[in-house]
């Protein structure tokens, strides 16, 4: 049974008020003595815990490290990540017919995705542990972020990618930032299996979202959404709709909200409903929610044009599923065609995203049509990656070019 309660006394293993706790058996572990990703006793996922949880009054500055009081360190390996925009999207709002709709665009981060938030914390932890190589499996965005932050920290980076399955823009980022890239004959989950084994052998420090400190950075998305929503219109969203790949953001947002409840800053009744969206060709979390399960069954064969969420075994499901259930949320699968339509709709509202990001809007529209989301709801859709992460998909979703002669009359004739 997953235990995600935050209460209890500070254990002896805590380091400056920080420790790790197993969400399965409750065992506590020193956070920075040794490299650890899973519970040594039962193999369960770990969560960072703190002796105190701050209120909004304790935050200062901007970006991820505005929220240092809620993080394990006062500063990290930073490239000015966070502080991403919360956009109005009037055309999509009208189509969805909800009380309010905003889009939190994580594509505005330094390497173009939300992964930067996790890396600014995770690479700092790696520095504290004294490791000499960072590593990840990736569908693209993780590799780009880790390569950039590894370069900033002057630490070598190893990346494992599923051969032929990663958008060129993302591979180019990792390569330019100096990562050693290995293309694996398999899918993302195979890559994660291999890199996890390398990490267990001590060959590298793993910075996939299995690493509990990655999610500490990602929980700042939730803090920003709440603050920006209050500043924009004086209230909080009723629901946050987000794409689901490894389910790290779902788990991180749920942890963010639990910590605010623990701090007395957020009433349980005001916690936004967490609503996950997957592509139909890679939807093990949706399958679990539809069947009321507290676990996922791995999909060995996954396929979708939304490459960032082409994942069949979301490792953070034990943390994310309680987040969906406990907040009164749900999960839905959408077709690639609907994802492309949503990508075009976002573009018409001036927001450029990669396909996986558009899944959140496609999911909102499907749930609204089904009546699972009602007209009186205030909704935030999370878009996780920039348009130019996958320029080929953007070109396919956009219009064709028109050949014209090199004179004004020829252009006017074409128009």
Image: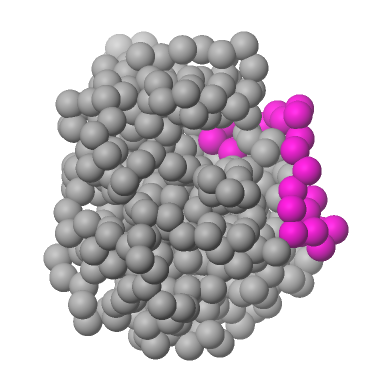
**Main SS of residues in magenta:** loop
Name of the residue lying farthest toward the right: 291
Viewer can see residue 86: no
Residue at point 29%, 80% (across, down): 55
Residue at point 27%, 60% (across, down): 15
Relative to 318, is 352 above or below? Answer: above
Highlighted range, magenta: 287-309
In the rendered image, the quadrant that contains the N terminus is bottom right
405 and 385: which is toward the camera: 385
Residue 169, position as x, y percentages in the image: 40, 23
Residue at point 61%, 82% (across, down): 376
Relative to 218, is 58 above or below? Answer: below
The colour scheme applied to this rendered structure is one colour
In the rendered image, the quadrant that contains the C terminus is top left
103 and 3: which is toward the camera: 3
Relative to 226, is 311 above or below? Answer: above
Q: Does the magenta run of residues contain 288?
A: yes
Viewer can see residue 202: yes
385 and 218: which is toward the camera: 218
Name of the residue lying farthest toward the front: 12
Name of the residue lying farthest toward the left: 61
Residue at point 22%, 82% (across, down): 57
The image quadrant of residue 282 is top right
Horizontally, residue 75 falls left or right of residue 187, namely left
Q: Does the magenta run of residues contain 26?
A: no
């Amino acid at each position: 049974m997953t235990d995600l309660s935050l209460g209890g006394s500070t254990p002896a293993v805590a380091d400056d008020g920080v420790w790790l706790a197993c969400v399965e058996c409750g065992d506590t572990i020193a956070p920075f003595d040794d490299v650890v990703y899973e519970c040594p006793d039962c193999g369960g996922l770990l969560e960072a815990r703190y002796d105190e949880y701050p209120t909004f009054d304790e935050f200062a500055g901007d970006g991820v490290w505005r929220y240092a009081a809620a993080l394990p360190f006062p500063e990290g390996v930073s490239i000015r990540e966070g502080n991403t925009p919360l956009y109005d999207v009037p055309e999509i709002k009208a189509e969805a017919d909800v009380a309010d709709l905003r889009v939190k665009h994580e594509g505005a981060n330094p390497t173009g995705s939300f992964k930067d938030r996790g890396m600014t914390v995770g690479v700092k932890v790696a520095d504290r542990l004294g490791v000499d190589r960072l590593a990840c499996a990736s569908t693209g965005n993780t590799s780009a972020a880790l390569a950039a932050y590894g370069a900033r920290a002057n630490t070598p980076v190893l990346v494992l990618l599923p051969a032929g399955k990663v958008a060129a823009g993302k591979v180019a980022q990792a390569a330019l930032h100096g990562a050693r890239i290995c293309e694996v004959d398999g899918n993302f989950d195979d890559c994660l299996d291999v890199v996890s084994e390398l990490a267990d052998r001590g060959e590298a420090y793993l910075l996939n979202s299995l690493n509990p400190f990655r999610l500490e950075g990602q929980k700042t998305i939730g803090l920003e959404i709440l603050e920006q929503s209050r500043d924009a219109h004086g209230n909080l969203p009723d629901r946050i709709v987000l794409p689901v790949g490894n389910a790290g953001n779902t788990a991180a947002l749920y942890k963010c909200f639990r910590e605010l409840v623990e701090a007395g800053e957020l009433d349980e009744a005001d916690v936004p409903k967490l609503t996950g969206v997957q592509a139909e060709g890679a939807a093990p979390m949706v399958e679990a929610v539809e069947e009321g399960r507290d676990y996922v069954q791995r999909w060995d064969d996954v396929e979708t044009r939304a490459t960032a969420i082409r994942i069949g075994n979301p490792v953070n499901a034990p943390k994310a599923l309680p987040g969906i259930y406990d907040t009164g949320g749900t999960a839905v699968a959408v077709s690639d065609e609907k994802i492309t339509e949503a990508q075009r709709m976002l573009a018409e509202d001036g927001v450029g995203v990669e396909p996986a990001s558009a899944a959140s809007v496609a999911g909102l529209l499907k749930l609204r049509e089904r009546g699972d989301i009602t007209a009186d709801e205030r909704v935030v859709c999370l878009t996780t990656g920039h348009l130019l992460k996958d320029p080929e998909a953007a070109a396919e979703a956009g219009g064709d070019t028109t050949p014209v002669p090199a004179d004004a009359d020829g252009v006017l004739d074409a128009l």
